[in-house]
Image: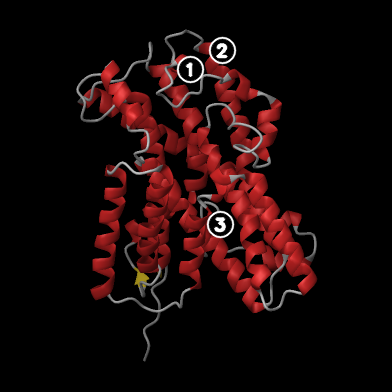
Amino acid sequence: MPKSPVVGTRPWSSVHLNAIRGVAALLVLLGHTRSLFFSSFTAMTGPTTTQTANHVARGNRTTVGEEAVIIFFVLSGYLVGGSVIRSIKNGTWSWKSYLLKRITRLWVVLIPALLFGISLDILGMHLFGSTTSIYAAPSTTLVPHDLAARLSWKVILANATFLQGILAPTAGTNNSLWSLAYEWWYYLQFPLLILVFSKTTKPSLRLLYLTAFLGSTVFVGREIMALFPSWLLGAAVAALPSTKLSKAFAIPLLTFSMSCLVLVKLFDMSKYLAAWSAAIAFSVILFCAVRQRGSCTNAVYRRVTGFFSDISYTLYLIHLPLAIFICALVDRPWHYYSPSIMTISTFLLMNAAVVVAAFLFYKLFEGNTDRVRRALANKSEDAGVLELSVERPEASARFG
């Protein structure tokens, strides 16, 4: 007689996906906040001129935060790309429902996050206008020198419509917004590409989709298209047969892939070679994670990973302007800290405050995404297609 499932459990594959999303979001957060407070956790003093020059000379070396963004791209390809493949294969594809899912997923958080970040930047520049503030820090920091110019309505509108890096810079101090433009265009290009080769696509539509795909690649430019393969790798993992992977194969693959991620960070590679290498290594990790069978009965692991996965998108969008504002508040005049118990404790408390703020922001906005979708789906048949259960991986994905 088969055993009854344990109440409150979730598949290991789903919990592992949550863990990956949560860890990636925290890596981006810690990578950015570290660069605000410390030149290095191993350096005992602030950076000298020579150290700063060396930092610039090693500009091609990828950071942990940059690897984490590539992880997000692969995850997005797996979740969103996988759903596109399944819907086209099953004959349930609809541009209307797909675009409504994508735009609500992004905008429900992006619009308030943009306004929040811009407001913090304006307030920070007003309160901390001194030349010794982080808002006037040297170019080796995350704060752009043309900050005032990045607060215009033109820039804000471009960021709200996913044109940052194409027609305008990222808004204010929120440099993290660059990846959203990449994501949005991948969302549009992938279905176009799949429909071009779908047997069910009419010849006239096939030509239209191909023209739209090629036109969009020219419009967005080389920078965005160069990382599209990393997104496609995630979709490729989703397209592979869903078979169980034994631990005898999974453990060596995971060990090798994790080692590759470390090596990518350590070696001086070109930006794109480092990104593609990290994407390949993580795709193997993702392949192993989603092929784990059974249910996770570890309540602590399940809840912790679920928490950080749920807030990962919100945390990504609001952390940088908030962290810079806090840095200007507590680090005056701005300087790099020397690692000590006191300074590291301050650093950790600041990160904890950002996480708490992200959770509150999540409760106000991202947590209501499904409600907004249902409100926008006026027809009952659309509501049935669009409604997502919070137990499904796509519902809690950063860009899912």
Residue nearer the viewer, 95 or 321: 95
Query: What residue did someone put label 1 on?
Result: 135
Three-letter residue code for mark 1: Tyr
Upstream in sequence: badge 3 or badge 1 = 1
Residue lying at the far top in this picture: please name it. Answer: 130
**Colour theme:** secondary structure
Q: How many marks?
A: 3
Residue 125 percent coordinates (x, y): 54, 15
Q: Find out whether the residues at labels 2 and 1 contact each other: C-beta distance under 8 Å.
A: no
What crowding class fits label 1: few (fewer than 14 Cα within 10 Å), some (14-19), or many (20 or more)? many
In the picture shown, does residue 12 fall above or below 169? below
Three-letter residue code for mark 3: Gly
Residue nearer the viewer, 57 or 330: 57
- Picture residue at 70% right of the left edge, 27% below the top: 153
What crowding class fits label 3: few (fewer than 14 Cα within 10 Å), some (14-19), or many (20 or more)? many
- Picture residue at 35% right of the left edge, 40% below the top: 63
Q: Secondary structure at mark 1?
A: helix
Can residue 391 be seen here? no
- Quadrant holding the C terminus: bottom right
Query: What residue did someone put label 2 on?
Result: 126
- Quadrant holding the N terminus: bottom left
Upstream in sequence: badge 2 or badge 1 = 2
Upstream in sequence: badge 2 or badge 3 = 2
Residue 186 percent coordinates (x, y): 59, 54
Q: Residue 400 got which mark?
A: 3
Residue lying at the far bottom in this picture: please name it. Answer: 1
Q: Secondary structure at mark 3?
A: loop
- Picture residue at 42% right of the left edge, 60% below the top: 17
Q: Secondary structure at mark 2?
A: helix
Q: Is residue 247 left or right of residue 183?
A: left
Can residue 358 be seen here? yes
